[in-house]
Amino acid sequence: MSGELPVYRPRCCFIGCKSMQVYGEDYESDPDFVSGATEFWCDCTGTGIGPDGCGVGIEECKDPQRPCFREY
């Protein structure tokens, strides 16, 4: 059986998006999130660029090697 669950990787506590504000932890059920139309921002900078100069996104902000990463 190849139905392995994906490895859990916590996200950074500083990432935000409209889906998270409206849906809370159920943000992945937002149709905008599902369609890829969600724009993410960093609460530290207020932009789509983190304090380390790298982009902000749900996958990018799960990297514990980033110096600005703080586990949610």
Image: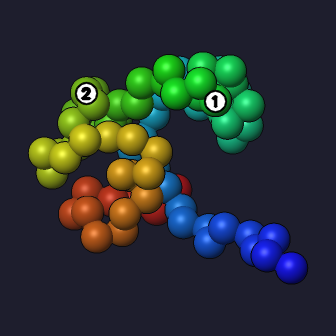
The foreground one among 2 and 37 is: 2
Q: Which residue is mark 1?
A: 34
Dots 2, 1 in contact, CB < 8 A: no
Kind of residue at badge 1: Val
- Quarter assignment of residue 42: top left
Q: Residue furthest right?
A: 1
The answer to which quarter of the image holds residue 50 is top left
Three-letter amino acid code at the position of disc 2: Thr
Q: Residue at x 86, y 79 (%)?
A: 1
SS class of the residue under badge 2?
loop
Which residue has dot 2 on it?
47
Residue 52 visible in this rendered orientation of the protein: yes
Residue nearest the observer in this picture, 10 or 72:
10
Side of 46 where 54 appears, left or right: left
Q: Residue at x 45, y 34 (%)?
A: 16
Q: How many marks?
A: 2
- The residue lying furthest to the front in this view is 1
Find numbered disc 1 in the image and state the secondary structure of the residue it sits on.
Answer: helix
Residue 51 lies left or right of residue 20; in this view the side is left
List x then y, in percent, for residue 27: 66, 33
Q: Residue at x 53, y 62 (%)?
A: 10
Categorize mark 1 by other alpha carbons within 10 Å: few (<14), some (14-19), many (20+).
Answer: few
Q: Earlier in the sequence, mark 2 or mark 1?
A: 1
Residue 54 position in % (x across, y down): 19, 46
Give residue 7's position: percent from left, percent from top.
Answer: 62, 72
Whether residue 21 is visible to the viewer of this picture, yes or no, is no
Between 36 and 49, the one nearer to me in the picture: 36
Q: Position of residue 23 (x, y in %)?
A: 70, 27
Classed neighbour count for the residue bearing mark 2: other residues with Cα under 10 Å, few (<14), some (14–19), many (≥20): some
The mark closer to the camera, 2 or 1, is: 1
